[in-house]
Amino acid sequence: MLLFIVIIGALLAFILGDFINQGRNLFGPGDTVAKAGGAKVDYNTFRDRVSEMSDQLKNNPQYANVTQEQIEAQVINDLLVEQLFEQEYDKMGIAVSDQQISKLFFDPQFAPSTFQFLMQQFGQSAQMLMQSGIIDTRTYSDAMKNPAKYQLNEEAASALTSVWAKLERDADDQLKQQAYSTMLAGLFTANQVDAKAMYNDRNTTRTFAYARKDFSAIPDKDIKLTDEDYQKVYDERKGAFKLDEPARLVKYIVVPIEPSANDQEVAAKDAAAFEKDLTSTEGTATALKNHKNFTASLGKYTRKKLADDANLKALLAGAPAPNDSTGAATGTVTVGEVKRMPTMPGTYMFAKVTGETTGIDVVKFSGLQIPASADSLLAGLNPANFDSIATSLGGFKEQEFSLVNPAATLPANLTAALSTQEIGQVFFLNDTVTSQDKNGKEVKKVVKGAYYISERSNPETVYDVTTMEYTVVPSSTSIRDINSKLHAFVANNGNAKAFDDNAKKNGYTVQQAIISPSAPSIGNTPNSRSAVKWAMDADKGDVSGVFGQNSNNGYIMAVAVEDVFDGDYIPVTSSYVRDGLKSLVMNNKKAEKLIAQYKGKAKDINGYAAQMGTQAASTTAVFGDNNIPAIGFNETAILGKVAGAKKGVVVGPFKGNNAVYVIQVTDVKAGGRPYDFKEESGNFNRMIGSAIMGNPLRLLLGNEKVTNNILQFTAAEEEK
């Protein structure tokens, strides 16, 4: 009996454990990260695509500041758009055949470009793949199926397959998009009337005189705004406040974790003592030992490179040397010299010349790894054909390197050879490359490289320079004080109104943002999605605890929920809408007052200018151009009035963006460019197409909303 009870107990524990683990599947979104309009993003596909995009961006400096949350938000959008487009393709009967994809990879016309693209995805590893005998798309395809034949391990074969599959997907998608765009373009093709109107708008210049009275002439305090005033402007711009999903208006405080004034004072004293030690002792070891806040790095520099460095040029002293062999106007450099570098506040940097040697700075050379299948090339390589053969076989042509600070990618034997081998002659080097076979066993292979030096600078003096830097960080006392102060503020201001009202008097700046489940962060605050999740689960008026105190984000934050939006639009009663529309509503009221004040008070431009206390001016406008010289951009009301006005007729007063205007067209000139239906219809089609395709997700969804469950998944991951 006891054994039976134990078994039943264990079974129940197993079932309940599985029940709890699968709770998200039973009562939550299951494996659906997001869905909209019949499209669904499942968790595994989402994670795979996030990993893929992260790998693509991590080595690109242009995307260095892109956060994981932003990548995830973009992936969800991309996957939804892809699936919604696939639905459109199915409805319209758009499909890509296997023959079309095969042609891209194996047709002689396209295969070389395709192979080049495939190799580009492997970066420096591409040379190794070619060394293994992968020299075109056919051998690439064969290597995916028979990796051992090319001495590749399973990991390398998997990478080949992944890159190939992605290119197939991209090609399939692009071909479908091209067909879809062609069919869609047929829905808004310009006719003769559209094309001629486009031509007339862009080809006619109107000169007009104007008088203006700025809205700033009326103080804001003299204007009373009503609910009706806000409603009128809101109705005109309601689309700007449309919600694709539930949202919250939050007020939030971000407090940077920064060094205190005392921290800065202590650091300044340490830096002064460090400089004294650095100057009074030989080398840098003693100073670095006594002042452990400083970190050091050693670099080698010619005088020209010192002169070109914004900081280290301070090490140059004395008169310029106009006959310097490097061509740089540099002075003398003294071994043992110490200089403090100009830096941003809170950072201390010193440089010391610790020695000098002789070296070669610049070498230009071409290179090629000889594939196993191309040994016959060895005898045929010569200075005349080297560059053309190297580039055709995936090598490189005339790249410039420094031998003073050789790149990490240059093997030591190659660096040495580049200093000594004869210029203008081909030479060969062997290198050993280590990889693994399919069983994980280490495999060593000797590869042969061919090289050709086209240029090398003369030996010159090279200086060893040690750069030492210290960035002041907040002390534990400062961090504790910053945290304690915000905790106390949150505890004493437990509702959104008190949070907002009392922030300034406590030394905090309150910001606001609209967030939704799709928001990767609150405002521009990095790594703040936990705060987004809290806010989306909170009620109106709630105030959060302190976020970020256990992270390394460099800040802490607190959030208050100002308003909750679950409808189709953010309502006009919201403070967010009121704040956003206030200047527009105010300008409307001021315009009404000024128009009433000046309407009918004069018969010509000069008369209106006199009434307005200003001078008449003149400028030109082209209806198809969004800029009016001397007035500004986006003055659509003025462009419309000028385009519709008869020559010599006074028009106004009417409202512009920042003032009321009276205008009079004085001249109309058509440009000399002849009318061309093909050109103008193309302009028309591009303009309409751009407007339609500007937001593909919204275009495809219509009035349907997005259900984004990403916060539930990230919360589950954070709890692990």
Image (cartoon, rainbow, N blue to C red):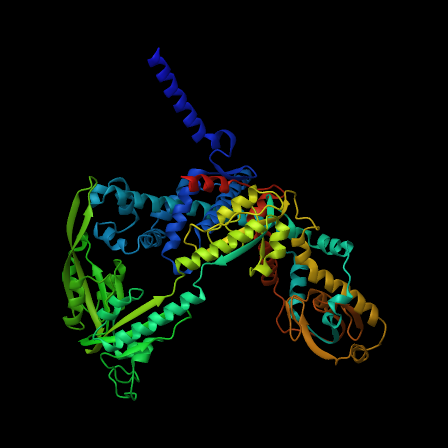
Comparing 380 with 256, the one in front is 256
Which residue: 62% across, 46% down? Answer: 541
Whether residue 496 is visible here, answered yes or no, is yes
Query: Residue at 51% of width from left, 33% of height from top?
Result: 28
The residue nearer to you, when weighing 472 against 594, is 472
Q: On the rendered image, what quadrant is the N terminus found in? A: top left
Q: In this view, does 20 lie to the left or right of 603?
A: left
Instruction: Using the rendered view, name the quadrant where residue 193 is placed.
Output: bottom right
Residue 62 % position (x, y): 42, 60
Coordinates of residue 596 in the picture (x, y in percent): 83, 68
The quarter of the picture where the C terminus appears is top left
Q: Is residue 45 above or below residue 594?
A: above
Left or right: residue 428 compared with residue 324: left
- Residue 457 seen in this snapshot: no
Task: Indicate the position of residue 593 as horizontal and vertical percent values.
Answer: 80, 67
Residue 252 image position (x, y, % from top left): 56, 53
Q: Residue furthest top?
A: 1
Q: Residue furthest right?
A: 600
> Depth check: 119 or 105 in front?
119
- Residue at left offset 45%, top offset 29%: 20
**Total tally of numbered discs in the picture:** 0
